Amino acid sequence: MHDDIEEILLSQEQIQQRVSELGQQLAADYVGRFPVLVSVLKGSIVFLADLVRSMPVPLSVDLMELSSYGASTESSGQVRILKDLSGPITGRDVIVVEDIIDTGLTLNYLLKYLRDRNPASVTICCLLDKPARRLAEIQIDYRGFTIPDRFVIGYGLDYDERYRNLPYIGVLRPSVYGAEPPEG
Amino acid sequence: MAATLRSGSPPRFAHQSEAELARILDFYNVEWRYEPDTFPISWNAAGAVVESFSPDFYLPEVDLYLELTTLKQSLVRRKNRKLRWLRQLYPEVRVKLFYARDFRALMVKYGRLDFLADVAAMNGNGPLNDDGGED
């Protein structure tokens, strides 16, 4: 285990098993529909890569990148689309693939953006659901795991661009990001 | 009427953390109102309101009131009590309490530890253990 990790929340085996189940479920639900899986860079790429390989049905993939709050507070003060969809989604069945849903603010923005492009349907598939601080109402159609209110990294999730390559999902030690440990 | 920090005259926030949360909501295009409603929660024998609760934010899209407290977890007992009363008296009202630890986690998520440090320095306190305008 990496020294910066307090504990492993989800092992590589647990993740592989659940992602495989999600992929099979999606494949069954979307057979004959040629869905497009839309992911947001960068955290979701590992999950997306594993998920599509568990879906033995015709599908396409597209990627978006959005500016995040902390990096953009000095610019427009609003979300900016750093990388747009590479193809139209009008009339398509869209599956939004997310690594983690926390406040739901980014996803809420993304859903409005996608729905404005008149897809046939939009559903959400997330690996991790962390509902404790949810500020937007998000209906999650396919959920990998519901997790407690901890700072998690690995399997695509980062802190300051690190730890994305860990094969498991771990809890980052608070001392790494300079936060106080929770009070008793 | 909904507010944003980009248009009209922004409200006078009781605490910098509230202004920061408003900036985050604006950033993600989430409509919000600042302290739009006050809920009486206790009355004296004459029927006069002696205690009330005005949640900091209302998010109309999700019909959710949001109270942001910057008190340390060990000091939020009074706030929790008021919230309990609010929920008992107004069960139809959806309200969420955002604790200091939640706000701190948001700042970590957005790489804004500098903001926490600034607030702490200005208040001469530890990270988010002051409390301006708690009600």
Image (spheres, coloured by chain):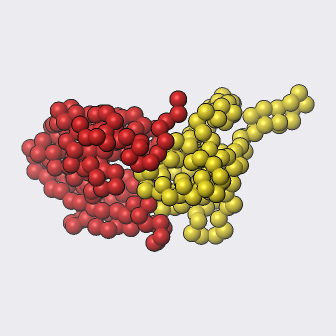
Chain colours: A red, B yellow
Q: Quadrant of residue A127?
A: top left
Q: Could one spot residue B98 in this view of the protein? A: no
Residue at figure coordinates x 23%, y 37% from the top left: A1
Looking at the image, residue B13 sits to the left or right of residue A78; the answer is right
Tell me if residue A84 comes above or below residue B63 in the rendering: below
Across and down, in percent, residue B63 comes to 55, 45
- In this rendered view, identify the residue nearer to me: B132 or B50: B132
Please identify the residue farthest to the right as the structure is shown: B46
Across and down, in percent, residue B69 comes to 61, 44
Residue at figure coordinates x 19%, y 42% from the top left: A167
Please identify the residue farthest to the bottom as the structure is shown: A75
Residue at figure coordinates x 69%, y 33% from the top left: B78
Q: Could one spot residue A41 in this view of the protein? A: yes
- In this rendered view, identify the residue nearer to me: A42 or B53: A42
Q: Quadrant of residue B54?
A: top right
Looking at the image, residue A42 sits to the left or right of residue B52; the answer is left
Residue at figure coordinates x 47%, y 38% from the top left: A181
Q: Which quadrant is home to the C terminus of chain B?
A: top right
Q: Quadrant of residue A111?
A: bottom left
Q: Which quadrant is home to the N terminus of chain B?
A: bottom right
Across and down, in percent, residue A184 comes to 53, 29
Looking at the image, residue A4 sits to the left or right of residue A33; the answer is right
Number of residue marks: 0
